[in-house]
Image: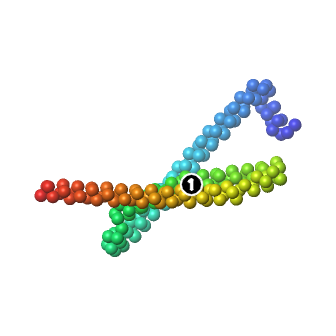
């Protein structure tokens, strides 16, 4: 008898009582997991907001030091979409991607350790597929980066057009008042 079986037999005298204890333990673990995940998410969101706020402040300070020629050389919509898009993307990366990467890394390490514990030869054969998978992921991510860049160019063009239209509308409205 293992210690866990001896402990369980002392806790519950019948199989139904043991099942009740097991269900209660599962519910307790799920509730603790939910509370810990909530605390983690709130803490990460607050940290992400602080970092993004600091970056926005530094960026605004830097923009004020640039000469007017910089703003004449670049489309306003391009600057606006890059400023807002890059900062939002950074916040998403800080909050979501880091947690997911940490969890995935921990899962991969645990799975590899389990594979070698169960069958070292089969684990080694299974790990031979990693270079192919890594190459495929690299190719796909390269295509995604290119598509993202193309989409951001389109968004900056539409933001520039929207900015120009709104500016013209404001000027027209101002001229009709006077």
Q: Is residue 130 left or right of residue 43?
A: right
Q: Position of residue 145 (x, y in %)?
A: 52, 59
Question: Is residue 69 visible to the viewer in this orientation of the structure?
Answer: yes
Q: Position of residue 104 (x, y in %)?
A: 65, 52
The image quadrant where one finds the N terminus is top right
- In the structure shown, which secondary structural element does the residue marked by tag 1 occupy? helix
* Quadrant position of residue 130: bottom right
How is this picture coloured? rainbow
Q: Position of residue 169 (x, y in %)?
A: 23, 55
The image quadrant where one finds the C terminus is bottom left
Seen from the viewer's position, the closer of residues 120 and 154 is: 154
Q: Is residue 118 left or right of residue 93?
A: right
What is the total number of numbered labels drawn onto the structure image? 1
Question: Is residue 80 visible to the viewer in this orientation of the structure?
Answer: no
Q: Is residue 101 left or right of residue 129?
A: left
Seen from the viewer's position, the closer of residues 155 and 105 is: 155
Seen from the viewer's position, the closer of residues 100 and 142 is: 142
Seen from the viewer's position, the closer of residues 112 and 144 is: 144
Residue at image position (36%, 56%) is 158
Residue at image position (60%, 52%) is 100
Q: Position of residue 43 (x, y in %)?
A: 54, 52
Q: Is residue 161 left or right of residue 178?
A: right
Q: Which residue is mark 1?
A: 97
Residue at image position (36%, 68%) is 74
63 is higher (above) or lower (below) than 159:
below
Q: Residue furthest right?
A: 1
- Could you classify mark 1 by the number of other residues whose Cα lies within 10 Å: few (under 14), some (14-19), or many (20 or more)? few
Residue at image position (57%, 57%) is 141
Q: Residue furthest left?
A: 178
């Amino acid at each position: 008898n293992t210690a866990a079986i001896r402990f369980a037999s002392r806790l519950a005298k019948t199989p139904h009582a043991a099942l009740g204890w097991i269900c209660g333990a599962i519910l307790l673990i799920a509730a603790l997991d939910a509370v810990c995940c909530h605390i983690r998410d709130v803490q990460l969101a607050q940290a992400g907001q602080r970092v993004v706020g600091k970056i926005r402040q530094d960026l605004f300070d830097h923009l004020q030091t640039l000469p007017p020629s910089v703003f004449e050389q670049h489309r306003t919509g391009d600057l606006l979409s890059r400023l807002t898009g890059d900062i939002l993307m950074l916040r998403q990366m800080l909050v979501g991607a880091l947690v997911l990467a940490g969890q995935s890394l921990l899962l991969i390490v645990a799975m590899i350790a389990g594979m070698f514990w169960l069958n070292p030869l089969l684990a080694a054969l299974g790990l031979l597929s990693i270079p192919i998978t890594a190459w495929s992921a690299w190719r796909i991510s390269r295509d995604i980066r290119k598509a993202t860049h193309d989409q951001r160019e389109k968004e900056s063009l539409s933001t520039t057009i929207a900015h120009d239209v709104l500016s013209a509308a404001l000027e027209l409205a101002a001229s009709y008042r006077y």
